[in-house]
Image (tube, helix red, strand yellow):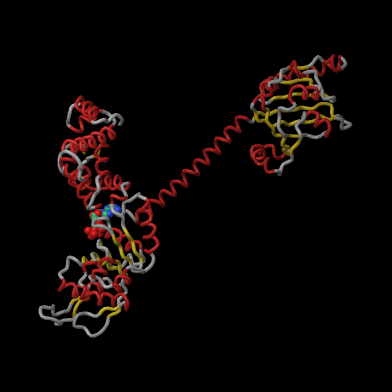
Amino acid sequence: MDNVNMNEIGYKSDEQDLFKKREADALAIADSISDGIYITDKNGVVTAINKAFTEITGIKAADIVGKNMQQVWNNVVLNSDPAFIEIKPEDKANAFDMFNNGKKKTLKTRKPCSIALLVLKEKKPISVLTTIDRMNKRVLITGTPFLDEDKNVVQVLTIIKDLTELFVLREKLEEVEKEKAKYLSEIKNLKKDIKERQLYKDLISKSSSMDKVIKLIENVSKTDATILITGETGVGKEVVARTIFKNSKRANGPYIRVNCAAIPENLLESELFGYEKGSFTGASQNGKLGLFEMANNGTILLDEIGEIPVKLQPKLLRVLQEREIKRIGGTSNIKIDVRVIAATNLNLEDEVKKGNFREDLYYRLNVIPIELPPLRERKEDISLLVYNFLGKFNKAYGKTKDFDITALEILENYSWPGNVRELENSIERLVVIGDEHLITRNTILSVLGQDKFYEASTETIDGTLKEAVDKFERNILEKTLKSCGSTYKAAKILGITQSTVVRKAKALGITEW
Ligand SMILES: Nc1ncnc2c1ncn2[C@@H]1O[C@H](COP(=O)(O)OP(=O)(O)OP(=O)(O)O)[C@@H](O)[C@H]1O
């Protein structure tokens, strides 16, 4: 610990001896502790500092010892510290929280000044939290007065506790806590997501157009409204109907699917509405429960509704209007509580115009229309469907097949006229056929047929055969080069040499990929 020559500050020699003796021990102890210490006399002159004081404040003994704190403050400290936050002695243990909450104006802030001088003035212990900017430190400074018998301050002991590391740790802890909270909420959301997706697990999609459909499904599932699902063959109309059923309050009731196109016209009526015993030649002696009755308290899907014979349409209209059926040969009406979902790949408005479908029945069915877009209009769904089907069929056939990037690209670019059904069947074939682990573009072309994937190039071409062939070649070469990014890889995929790829690309004017 560095201290001042006692003569210089006016101590008598016997006082000096006593003082020095006592101090010698105290100073040795002071140097060994990690808190910064400085002592000022009753005039505010610094009489001693310890080593930690210099380490924490950067102020050397020569700059401070023997000098008045006001002078030191003016020369060294002033302008470097922001406002002091005063901490009551009893709050010192909670200095961290005090500092963080200090910005909340609940704590008294003081104009930066020398704590020793402040203690001299106010004659009481004072603690402040502040920063020493030039040392990049956060500190708790506590000044304690030593009073004589007349309550005059004879000395001030100021201790500077370096809290920087603790603050850094505290901040890190807070960051970790925040991260933890973020992850916990993410996990919660994920679980919620998975739970929600569970309801839609049969309906795989990520396209925005299918998102809209899912939103609509969510909204209509909870109602009993009649729904008409339209869309090309294989787009997933049945999947949507089943999803609505599973999410409805009728989920525990029956779900009956009737393919109106698959049942012969003369049988459809008895299938739908049932018959009383002996009501017609060949009828069962016990009569028969119709599908509407079987679906009571549940849901009936009238698939391929566009195919329902005109003769039967008034009877169906009556069921929708009155919510009751009459069995063939029966005399009484039977009340039924069935939610009706109809699906078709025909344009029912056209069928109405052609006279094949009753307009009133169309309106009764079309209360909530759900139109499913064809797969070619939601290409974003293809990769997700591909990998889902790949997983499904790998599991089913005990395989571990995978697609390479060129394979996925060719699948994404195909127009899939048979929609998801065609895609699903294609993936099944690709998994079943062949032993190679990796399904490549070539595998697809050979298993599923070249022609179908080159349909885009079979459009009518004006010009000579050579021009048509060139266009076709350029198309294939360009796409392959773009998808794999190298002439070597393209050569491998297309089954030609790399020099042929380079020569053809040059001849066909393909310069970038
Ligand atoms: N979004 C989807 N996610 C997963 N599988 C789907 C999806 N859409 C359709 N499928 C699958 O595709 C096949 C055809 O679907 P679905 O029978 O629902 O089509 P559809 O539109 O009713 O066809 P159709 O008009 O020929 O009756 C089914 O095996 C079904 O599981």
Question: Which sits in the foreground, 497 or 73?
Answer: 497
Q: Position of residue 117 (x, y in %)?
A: 81, 29
Q: Position of residue 423 (x, y in %)?
A: 23, 49
Q: Position of residue 89 (x, y in %)?
A: 73, 37
Q: Position of residue 308 (x, y in %)?
A: 21, 70
Question: Which sits in the foreground, 242 or 35?
Answer: 242
- Kindly identify the residue that appears in the image at 37 percent across and 51 percent down: 208
- Locate residue 346: give its quadrant: bottom left
Q: Quadrant of ligand 1?
A: bottom left
Question: Which sits in the foreground, 415 or 200?
Answer: 415
- Residue 457 seen: yes
Report the residue that reaches farthest toward the left. 282
| Relative to 23, 395 lies left or right | left
| The N terminus: image quadrant | top right
Report the residue that reaches farthest toward the bottom. 331
- Locate residue 431: give its quadrant: top left
| Relative to 49, 242 lies left or right | left
- Locate residue 358: give its quadrant: bottom left
- Kindly identify the residue that appears in the image at 10 percent across and 80 percent down: 281
Tally of marks: 0
Question: Which sits in the foreground, 185 or 55?
Answer: 185
- Residue 289 seen: no
Q: Is residue 45 above or below residue 304?
A: above
Report the residue that reaches farthest toward the front. 463
